[in-house]
Image (tube, coloured by chain):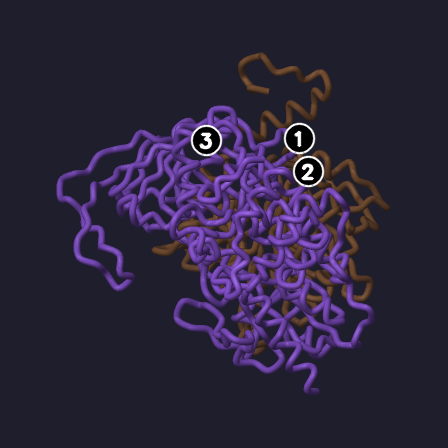
Amino acid sequence: MEVDVMKRIPVREQDPKVRAANFEEVCLGYDKEEAMAEATRCLQCKNPQCVKGCPVNIDIPGFIKEVAEGNVEGAYHVIGEYSALPAVCGRVCPQESQCEVKCIRGIKGDAVSIGKLERFVADAAREQGVKPVKAESLNGKKVAVIGSGPAGLTCAGDLAKLGYDVTIFEALHKAGGVLSYGIPEFRLPKTKVVDAEVENVKSLGVKIETNVVIGKAITIDELLNEEGFDAVFIGSGAGLPKFMGIPGENANGVFSANEYLTRSNLMQAFDDDYATPIVAGKKVAVVGGGNVAMDAARTALRLGAEVHIVYRRSEEELPARVEEVHHAKEEGIIFDLLTNPTQIFTDDEGNVKGMECIRMELGEPDESGRRRPVEKPGSEFTLDVDTVIMSLGTSPNPLISSTTEGLDINKWKCIVAEESNGQTSKAKVYAGGDAVTGAATVILAMGAGKAAAKGIHEFLSKK
Amino acid sequence: MYKIVKKEYLANNIWLMDVEAPRVAKSCQPGQFVIVKTDEKGERIPLTVCDYDREKGTVTIVFQTVGASTELMKDLGVGDSFQDFVGPLGCASELIEMPEEELKKERILFVCGGVGTAPVYPQVKWMHEHGVDVDVIIGARTKDLMILENEMRAVAGNLYVATDDGSYGFKGNGCDQINDLVNNQGKTYTRVVAIGPMIMMKFVAQLTKELHIPTIVSMNPIMVDGTGMCGACRLQVGDEIKFACVDGPEFDGHLVDFDQAMLRQRMYKTEEGRAMLRLQEGDTHHGGCGNCEG
C-alpha cells in the first residue's frame, strides 16, 4: 500500500444516502492492511505529546508500533494496560481535541489517525478472540461499583486486575450506561461492541448485578455495613434531562433526548420485533447543539423524519464534535442556527403542531467565553413540526446523594470528589465521571474511573 | 431472573402474581412501584406494589391486560420468570412517613377504582398493622369486576362497596359513595387517598376539593426507566412540572392537571394498537392494509 506520510489513510464509511435509512454503523473502520500502513506514519516520538493528551495516558506510540508490525494481540495488551474499553474509545473519543491534536505529524500534514487505529486493534482482537489478562489471585477485598457506564466499567476493570472482588450494580436491565441507552447503534454498535467490551470486563472476574437501584433497593451505607464491601465507587452518571420551561412543553410529541434515545437504543424501539414504541415524527425539531442532539437528530432521520437542529448560537459554537456535525449534514439534517424556541403549539388532542422560534444574534462573550446569544425583537416565526426533542443537557440524579449521609454535593447537584483519586467527603466512598463533573465525555469518565481505582487501591492497601 | 411463585385470576382481565425479588421485597414500602419486563424484547412496565413478604422475598403485583405487553405477561405461569424486575421505585406513601401520633389523629378514607384497588391494599394493611383504622371504598362497574374485597375487608376499618349498576353494595360510583358517607351518614374525613383510573381520580379530587378534604392520588403515567432519566412521566402539578417516577407516584390530587395527564396517556395509542394487531394476527399479520404500516 502506498503511503503519503503527510496524509492519513482514509477510512471507509457507509454512503450518506444509504446510511440515512439504516441503523448500521456509519464508519466501517480500517482493515489490517490500511491499519498497518497508517501505523507507519507514526514518528515514534521519544517524548510523545499524544500520550499527554489522552485522559487515560495510553502508550500510543507503543501500541501503534505493534500495529505497524501486524501484531494485533501485542497492540491489544498495550492498550489493555490503560483502557478497558478500546473499541468504544476508538469510536466515540474526541481524538481531534485530545491525542491527535498533539501529534507532530499534524503540524505539516494530517495527524496520525490514532482513534481509528485503536478501533482497529480492539475490533481485530475481538475477532481473534484475544481476552484481557485476569488477576492471578483475589486479594480478599470487596469493592462495589455503582453504575456500569464508562466510569464504572473502567474502575471495576482496573480493580479486578489488581485482585479485588468487584460487583457492579446497574439500575437498568442492561449494562453499559450511556453506551447502551445513549449513544446510537450507528455510532456504537450494541451487540458487537458494547456487549463485547462488557463481557471483557466480566472476564476479569467483575460481577454485574442489573436491576438494582442504589438509594432505593439498598443504600451505600448498607453496602458498606451489611454487604461487606470495603469501598464503594459511584459512577452513576448524569441522567436527569433538562427542559426549557416554555409553554406547551408537556404536549404529546415533546420528548427529552434521553427518552428518545433510550427508547431507540436501550429498548430498540426502531426494531419492530421489540415491544417498546417510539414516535417517528414526520418533521422533527431537535433543540440543542451537542453530541446528544446530533445523535437524537440522526436517529429521528433514520426513522424517516425531516429533521431540524435548532440551536441558539452559530455553527462555530456548536458543542458537538466536528465529525458528528459533518456526518449529520451529509445525511441531510437541516441546521436552523441562531434560533431559539419560545413556545410549542398543540392541537385539540394535545399533540404538537408547531414550534414558535425567535432569531438570535451574537452579543458580548458570557462567562463561558462564548458570545451570548441575544433575541432579535419581532423575528418570531413558526416551524411546522410535529415532534420536538429537547437536548439541553443533563444533570446528576439525586437518588444517591439524597440517601447517603455525609456525601457532599455542589450547587449543580454534582458529587464533590478529588480529581486525583476520586475521594468524596465520605470515608470509603469514591466517585467519578458525569456524577462528579456533570455531563462530559466517555473518555473523561473513564479517566476518572481509573483515578478512583488507583485511589481505592491506595486506600485499601494501607489498611 | 425473577420467578413467579403464585398466579391468580382476579376478575375483568386482572391478574395477581407473586414474584421472587428478594432485594425489592426487603426494601419496598406501600406506595412504591416496580418495573417488570417479560423478556429480552419486552417493554418496561411500571406496576404499583400490591403486597410483599420480606421473609419469603416475594413481591405481589396486580395488572390488567390492556395491550400486547400485558397479554404476554398474562401468559406466564407459576415457575416461569420475568427477565427483569426492578424496584422499589418512587417514594413511599407520605402517610406511612408521618409520625405515628399524628397519623392516629387522621381519619382517612381510601377510594379504589378497578385495578387501583391493588395498590391501595398494602397501604390499608400497613395502617391496620400500625393500629390505624381506615375506611375504604371499592368501586366497580358491576359486582363481577370487584377485586380483593375479602383481603381488604380483613384489614379495613369500614369497607364500603359500590357498583355503578347496583348489582352489589351501594348503587353508584366512588364519588356518589363519598357524597353519601359525608353528606348523609355524617362521616368526617381529614384525608382521602384515591387510586384508580385517571378519570375516576379526577372526579374524586374535584369532589373532595369542594368538600375541603386534602386528597392524595397515585399517578401511573407512561414511563421508560422509572429512575428520573427519561422525563416521559412528567406531570403538571400546580405551578411545577414533576416526574411521577421520582417525585411521585403520589401527588396532591387538587394540584394535578388530570386533563393533560389523560392526553399524555394516549400518546402511543396508535403504536400500541399496531403491536396488538401484530400479536393477535401472529404470522398472518401481513400489513399492507394501509392502516398499520406493518
Q: Chain letter for mark 3, please.
A: A
Say whether mark 1 and mark 3 are on the same chain. Answer: yes
Q: Do the residues labelled 3 and 1 touch (CB within 8 Å)?
A: no
User: Relative to B71, does residue A161 appear above or below in the rendering?
Assistant: below
**Earlier residue among tags 3 and 1:** 1
- Shade of chain A as shown in the rendered figure: purple
Q: Position of residue A151 (x, y in %)?
A: 58, 62
Q: Which residue is drawn at 17% across and 53% down?
A: A363
Q: Is mark 2 on a helix, strand or loop?
A: loop
User: Residue drawn 79% across and 55% down?
Assistant: B20
Q: Mark 1 points at which residue?
A: A273
Q: Quadrant of the C terminus of chain B?
A: top right
Dot 1 and dot 2 residues touching (CB under 8 Å): yes
Q: Can residue B173 be seen in this view?
A: no
The mark closer to the camera, 2 or 3, is: 3
Q: Mark 2 points at which residue?
A: B41
Q: Which residue lies furthest to the bottom in this view?
A: A463
